[in-house]
Amino acid sequence: MTLPLTRTAHARATLVLGLPLIGSHLAQMLLHVTDMVMLGWYSVTALAAAVIATSTFFVIFILGAGFAQAVMPMVASAIGRGDDVQVRRDTRMGLWLSIAFGVLAYPLFWWSEPLLLTLGQKPEVAALGQEFLRIAGLGMIPALLVMVLKSYLAALERTQVVLWVTLAAVGVNIAVGWALIFGNWGAPEMGVRGAALASVTVQVLTAVALAIYAGWLPELRRFRLFQRFWRPDWHALRQVFKLGMPIGLTSLAEGGMFEASAIMMGWVGTVQLAAHGIALQAAALTFMVHLGLSNATTVRTALASGAGDAVAVRRGGRVAIGLSMMFAVVVVILFLTFPEAIISVFLDRAKPEAAQILAFGTSLLAVAALFQVADSLQVMALGLLRGVKDTRVPMLIAALSYWGIGIPASYLLAFKAGYGGVGLWLGLVIGLSVAAGLLMTRFWMKAPRVV
């Protein structure tokens, strides 16, 4: 990959790398959106249970995914140095750590009902949530392996295959979910269990497809990714762990904030929790664009930093942030202009609770428009910082911003100030805004100086 100096060239190169990643992230989100849509048509209780269960799954998943995200800048840096052996070592140990994490995490899914009850969820929601997680938890290992392989391929500029495999997975998920959730085409009616089984099926098939591509594509065979896979490489494992664990904890701090918001929304009511899940899915879909740009920026920043090109690091960072901000403005306009149309996609308007969910969800989307800018800035800053291998201090900033400020603000505004669910989301805005400001300041302090 070349590192052009002009802003236009930086923008073009970032988009060439980032657009397929954006598409794959959007397709990945569609896997979950389609589940929410089908379960929303199935029953409100099933939807509420899936909201809390998938939130729990992803809080754990994003911690383990830190190792996969560490692989991206490490492989990009090794490629910049021409070190093919280190590419294999780092990626392989990322796969090892992902497998180990998935095994250790599964007991949390099997015994999740007591946890959900302790967190204040209604008994019927907690019971259905555990049914979902006992099946969906089996997909943790393949889901993490997919993340490692995506990071490996992205660092090698093989993002097109990631997009097409993920798009194919959406089609499989819709077909399997439609059959198993509702009992169509002669399949048993399984409700939330059907949605979980569809997800596991998709994760396994995706992992297999990407592994075949990564291992046997002629252009990539020189890396010998799976040769003597069973042999440990303790130095590389420590390096991936050292960089990846702070990334995972940073993501956990943010994901945990949204999980805590789902739990507190459950205290408000089941209808409000269902609306929260719908509005959050809409916001998360748009966030995938910023995440794709952030991933592309991580790769390009790692290459530039490894090459000692301070101009490319700083100018590329400014261009990537500008691209992200442009999209954020578009989303703000959409959320404020068409909230009912967006919420209605997830609902059967004939259901008795639909009017309440629509009204409350519309209010939440208005607040979601407020945190578009802050959310995009914080994820772009994280991508830039990972490109220069700075992960420990960002982890502390995230913990302070999300848990020291965001969650307390949500609780106070929702339950003490009397603003309910809307106040809860305003607290999220505060936490994200603080994180964005501190992380951006951190990057411009850490970025190499132009001599």
Image (cartoon, rainbow, N blue to C red):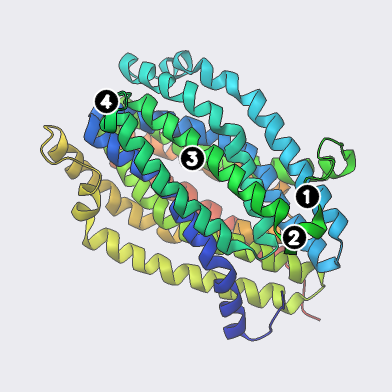
The quarter of the image holding the C terminus is bottom right
Mark 4 lies on residue: 45
Tell me, yes or no, whether the two marked residues, 1 and 3, touch with CB atoms within 8 Å: no
Quarter of the image holding residue 119? top left
Q: Is residue 422 left or right of residue 449?
A: left
Which amino acid type is marked by label 2? Leu
Name the residue located 62 percent from the left edge and 65 percent from the top edge. 297
Is residue 156 positioned above or below 99 on the image?
Answer: below
Does dot 3 land on a helix, a strand or a loop? Answer: helix
Mark 2 and mark 1: span between their CA atoms? 9 Å
Name the residue located 49 percent from the left edge and 40 percent from the top edge. 202
Which amino acid type is marked by label 3? Val
Mark 4 and mark 3: span between their CA atoms? 24 Å
Q: Position of residue 37 (x, y in %)?
A: 29, 41
Mark 4 against mark 2, which lies toward the viewer? 2
The numbered mark, 3 or 2, whose residue comes first in the sequence reads 3
Mark 4 against mark 3, which lies toward the viewer? 3
Mark 3 lies on residue: 202
The numbered mark, 4 or 3, whose residue comes first in the sequence reads 4
* Circle on res. 225: 1
* Circle on res. 220: 2
Is residue 165 positioned above or below 34 on the image?
Answer: below
Mark 4 and mark 2: span between their CA atoms? 47 Å
Is residue 225 positioned above or below 99 on the image?
Answer: below
